[in-house]
Amino acid sequence: MNNFKCMCPPGSIVVAGFPCLCHLGSVHLRWEWNPDGCILNACEHDSPCKDPLPSYQCMCPSGGEGYFCEQESNDCKMNPCENNSTCTDLHNNYRCECTSGWTGQNCSEEINECDSDPCMNGALCHESTIPGQFVCLCPPFYTGKFCNQHYNPSDPLTDPYRNNETCLTLVDGNHYCICREVFEDQQQLTINHKCTI
């Protein structure tokens, strides 16, 4: 009576010392035999085993999957990284490489670009509505993205304006020009036109 042979369906897995390990029990002639699958210790990575009829089940820990918990799960499969970031699968974890303007484990926290104080020479930083961008409001006589370039409005070599305009920067930060317009060989000065940078 202890001498039997398992007849397992195709695709069954061979376990050390047993002819096969059947997911739904084994069939021998007219008897059904359902061994305690947990005795076989077939669950990998120290996964606990549960033996409900008609089969047994490996309870995979975080990071494992597959019938025997033999496969490492891909933590990036659920797309945890937000805002077009790149996900890298690690062992039982993941890492998000955030796009510009975002931070945090899942790249869900917007960076305030002005927190790093990028504007120079007393300029005011204004965060843009576009993530990762900002605008520096330059004080008089400074220009450039970071307000790091000094200019003299009366010096034609450093004056950033065109068309022979003479531009002034007022204390409130506004720029005004004295523009030269030519009418019938006469030069006429037009004052207080707002400069366009």
Image (cartoon, rainbow, N blue to C red):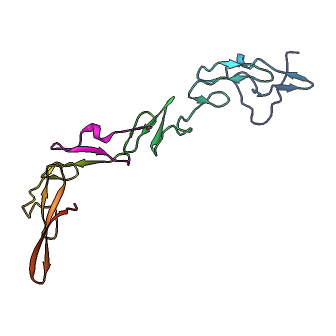
Q: Residue at x 15, y 63 (%)?
A: 177
Q: Closer to the camera, 61 or 195?
A: 195
Q: Where 34 sits versus 108, above or below?
A: above
Instruction: Using residue 33 as the reference point, say whether residue 148 is left or right of it.
Output: left
Give residue 179's quadrant in the image. Answer: bottom left
Decide whether residue 43 is among the magenta residues: no
Q: Closer to the camera, 175 or 64?
A: 175
Instruction: Using residue 38 as the reference point, say whether residue 133 is left or right of it.
Output: left
Give residue 48's quadrant in the image. Answer: top right
Give the residues in magenta: 107-130
Quarter of the rendering occupied by the N terminus:
top right
User: In the image, residue 160 lies at what x, y percent?
Assistant: 16, 61
Q: Which residue is drawn at 41% across and 41% down?
A: 98
User: In the image, residue 149 lies at what x, y percent?
Assistant: 14, 52
Decide whether residue 109 is among the magenta residues: yes
Considering every residue shown, the one lying at the far left of the view is 155
User: In the image, residue 194 lies at what x, y percent?
Assistant: 20, 61
Q: Residue at x 9, y 83 (%)?
A: 185
Q: Where 153 sits versus 126, above or below?
A: below
The count of marks equals 0
Q: Which residue is drawn at 25% across and 44% down?
A: 125
